[in-house]
């Protein structure tokens, strides 16, 4: 066989494979609904080892016996789990919008307001991009630098194959699959997400961001993230991106687990801007996220910062289990709800070790006809000597059709615990608006300024660049809410 | 050009009449003082001119720079060159003066169809004007008026005026709550800013302020209207024997 023939044959083979794949796409979505076959299918698609599949199946069995949590202050129709696709392969080039002109102009307008470069807009909007552009090459450069330090930053499906010992040890160790129905569901059907391991005494020199890693791929609705910071290490992780995500999935049930060993610190920042539904409350994503961090070792620290502006329904309580003595948990949150959005969000701080400390700063802003609930649970177990918690919950109401609710649970089994709780609810101040407008700012600009000021305590916890974008996002979320 | 002309202005709040056929004319470059006892309607006048929506204008006309002022909303009046130095500047927690005032000046420049200021030129301007008013850079880092003393708040008002460069500034009892030193600093700031193009309407209860800023005209106001107009000697008369003679 001459070399030309070989080449042709190879090409043919590749083409054949490609076709095979296309045919498979049909069977990639054989039917809606969830059963053991679908889970086996997902596992097979991802070429997973046997132990992973049996874990999934065990989680599925647990899920079957569970019902959804009902305690949140949320109203939405019951979810029909048999009416959902649990696996969808990455979209084909032909299925994607050809260019930005095929994308919803409202989305583009928001991107422009956020100052997102054109090339990145294309990726965010899911436009087929074949050329290598900036952030992809940036990502490659980053990857090399991280590898030199021994840092593992890859997709969880990859980690299952490359670092099975870590995944086996820690997956489900902070959020037991049987915790509640959404965690069981996620454990059974998760499709992808991030995996991070920071070796002993390594301070990760840059913010790790999903934005760099996976934007070209589709994470899917059941995201699973696992971050492990080994002794004495540090990492700051950014989830998502301030730009609204084009997404057709209705239900999102992500699970994020963090583990900080002795003297390690993890900082996890999120800006969530999923589609919230339209002005009349139609459509929008249900976001049921479980995020939990374990301060496993002494002197470890986990800090959650979230800015929640999207989704029709948000159910989310990033939590810390403070097991190691002297460990620290922090939760900083801004939740903005507009139109008919509903958010039930907050945190859970579980003090187990001695001298453990936690701090909660929550800022809720309600506009339109939305409902915004802070729900917190601070508990001190018997051995948590001299543990402390400080909680501050502030709610701001704009208009008179929205609602703000604060539901703090406190439970102490140790007499030496110190708990401070401050809460306030206020309406946006007319005098402040008058003052700003007298200086030439429009009503809308004034509201945005005052709300940004109200959130500052939280926004300043975000990494610099993110904070600037988050501020713009806060302003955009308020648009059209006042008049 | 008619700079400011108020003609038979009637204003009430919750059904109660506060301004009663009120009249005044102010030309470019003039400094007018309105003095009057508590409750005579001085502060109402200031807020009605600024466009405060709590007051109801039942009749009358206000022309500002050849335009019907009552047709404009609060921010449009500001952009047109009207500045109100508040009696009680409100605290805005978490909001720093830099982005706030930067947005303000740009809204005005935009309205004037002039190029907007970039971050650097604005920062320079702010620093320069703050220095002249004895405002430290530490103070510029704090949230607007939050935890400020009475004197600091009034100095912040003057700083904002000096940046926004209005044609008409209304001082609503700017001297209230100020000790002698603070009053001196604030009035020095005002005097530095004064020139032949700018006009001022000073609303005050006491003569003290007028010792530092010399008005061209002094008006005495009672029960919602001006009852007597004159020069600075009118202020001395009030200082000597109070308002009962008017």
Image (cartoon, rainbow, N blue to C red):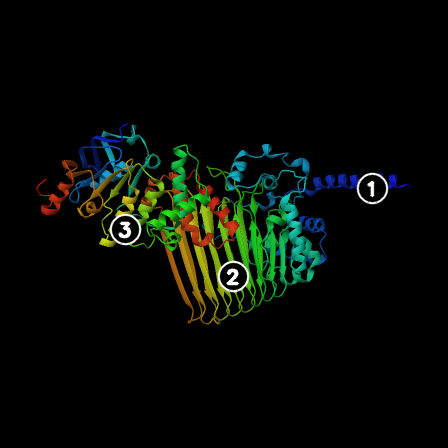
Q: Nearer the viewer, mark 2 or mark 1?
A: 1
Residue A463 point in image, percent of width and height: 52, 53
> Which of A222/B65 is in front?
B65
Q: Are marks 3 and 1 in contact (CB under 8 Å)?
A: no
The residue carrying mark 1 is A10
> Which of B204/A188 is in front?
B204
Q: Quadrant of the C terminus of chain A?
A: top left
The residue carrying mark 3 is B185
Q: Quadrant of the N terminus of chain A?
A: top right
Point 16% across, 36% down: residue = B225
Q: CA distance from mark 2 to mark 1?
A: 53 Å
Mark 2 is surrounded, within 10 Å at the Cα level, by few (under 14), some (14 to 19) or many (20 or more) other residues, namely: many
State which chain disc 3 sits on. B
The residue carrying mark 2 is A320
State which chain disc 1 sits on. A
Nearest to N terminus: mark 2 or mark 1: 1
Q: CA distance from mark 2 to mark 3?
A: 52 Å
């Amino acid at each position: 066989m001459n070399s030309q023939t070989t080449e042709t044959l190879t090409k043919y083979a590749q083409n054949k494979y490609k076709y095979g794949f296309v045919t498979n796409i049909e069977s990639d979505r054989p039917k809606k609904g969830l059963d053991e076959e679908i889970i086996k299918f997902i596992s097979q698609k991802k070429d997973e080892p046997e132990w992973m599949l049996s874990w999934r199946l065990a989680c599925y069995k647990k899920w079957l016996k569970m019902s959804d949590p009902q305690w949140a202050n949320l109203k939405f129709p019951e979810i029909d789990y048999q009416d959902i696709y649990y696996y969808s392969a990455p979209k084909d080039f032909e299925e994607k919008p050809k260019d930005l002109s095929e994308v919803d102009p409202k989305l583009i307008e928001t991107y422009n307001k956020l100052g997102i470069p054109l090339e990145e807009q294309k990726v965010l909007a899911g436009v087929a991009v074949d050329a290598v552009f900036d952030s992809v090459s940036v990502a490659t450069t980053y990857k090399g630098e991280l590898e030199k330090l021994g840092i593992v930053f890859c997709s969880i499906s990859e980690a299952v194959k490359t670092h099975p010992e870590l995944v086996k040890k820690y997956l489900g160790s902070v959020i037991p699959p049987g915790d509640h129905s959404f965690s069981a569901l996620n454990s059974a059907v998760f499709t992808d997400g991030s995996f991070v391991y920071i070796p002993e005494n390594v301070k990760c020199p840059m913010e790790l961001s999903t934005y760099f890693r996976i934007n070209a791929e589709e994470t899917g609705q059941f995201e699973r993230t696992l971050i492990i910071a080994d002794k004495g290490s540090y990492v700051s992780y950014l989830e998502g991106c301030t730009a609204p995500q084009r997404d057709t999935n209705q239900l999102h049930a992500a699970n994020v687990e963090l583990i900080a060993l002795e003297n390690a610190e993890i900082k996890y920042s999120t800006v969530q801007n999923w589609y919230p539904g339209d002005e009349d409350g139609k459509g929008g994503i249900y976001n049921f996220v479980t995020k939990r961090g374990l301060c496993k070792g002494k002197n470890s620290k986990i800090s959650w910062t979230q800015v929640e502006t999207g989704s029709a329904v948000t159910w989310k309580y990033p939590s810390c289990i403070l097991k190691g003595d002297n460990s620290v948990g922090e939760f900083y949150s801004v939740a903005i709800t507009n139109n008919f959005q509903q958010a039930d969000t907050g945190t859970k701080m579980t003090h187990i070790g001695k001298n453990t400390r936690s701090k909660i700063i929550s800022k809720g802003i309600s506009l339109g006809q939305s409902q915004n609930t802070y729900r917190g649970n601070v508990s001190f177990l018997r051995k948590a000597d001299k543990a402390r918690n400080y909680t501050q919950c502030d709610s701001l109401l704009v208009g008179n059709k929205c609602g703000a609710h604060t539901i703090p649970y406190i439970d102490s089994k140790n007499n030496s615990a110190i708990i401070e709780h401050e809460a306030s609810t206020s309406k946006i101040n007319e005098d402040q608006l008058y003052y700003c407008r007298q200086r030439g700012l429009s009503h809308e600009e004034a509201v945005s300024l005052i709300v940004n000021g109200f959130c500052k305590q939280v926004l300043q916890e975000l990494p610099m660049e993110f904070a600037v974008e988050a501020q713009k996002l806060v302003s955009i979320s308020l648009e059209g809410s006042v008049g | 050009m008619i700079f400011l002309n108020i003609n038979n202005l009637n204003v009430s709040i919750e059904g109660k009449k506060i301004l009663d056929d009120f009249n005044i004319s102010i030309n470019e470059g003039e400094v007018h003082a309105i003095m009057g006892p508590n409750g005579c309607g001085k502060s109402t006048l200031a807020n009605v001119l600024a466009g405060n929506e709590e007051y109801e204008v039942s009749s009358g006309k206000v022309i500002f720079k050849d335009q019907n002022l009552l047709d404009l909303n609060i921010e449009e009046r500001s952009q047109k060159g009207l500045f109100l130095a508040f009696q009680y500047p409100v605290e805005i927690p978490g909001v720093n003066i830099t982005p706030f005032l930067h947005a303000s000046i740009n809204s005005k420049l935009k309205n004037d169809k002039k190029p907007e200021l970039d971050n650097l030129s604005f920062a320079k301007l702010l620093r320069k004007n703050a220095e002249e008013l004895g405002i430290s850079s530490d103070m510029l880092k704090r949230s607007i008026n939050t935890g400020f003393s009475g004197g600091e708040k009034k100095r912040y008002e003057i700083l904002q005026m000096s940046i926004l460069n209005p044609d008409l500034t209304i001082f609503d009892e700017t001297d209230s709550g100020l000790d002698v030193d603070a009053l001196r600093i604030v009035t020095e700031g005002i005097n530095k800013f004064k020139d032949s193009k700018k006009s001022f309407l000073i609303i005050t209860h006491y003569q003290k302020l007028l010792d530092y800023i010399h008005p061209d005209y002094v008006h005495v106001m009672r029960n919602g209207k001006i009852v007597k107009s004159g020069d600075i000697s009118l202020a001395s008369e009030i200082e000597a024997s109070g308002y009962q003679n008017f």
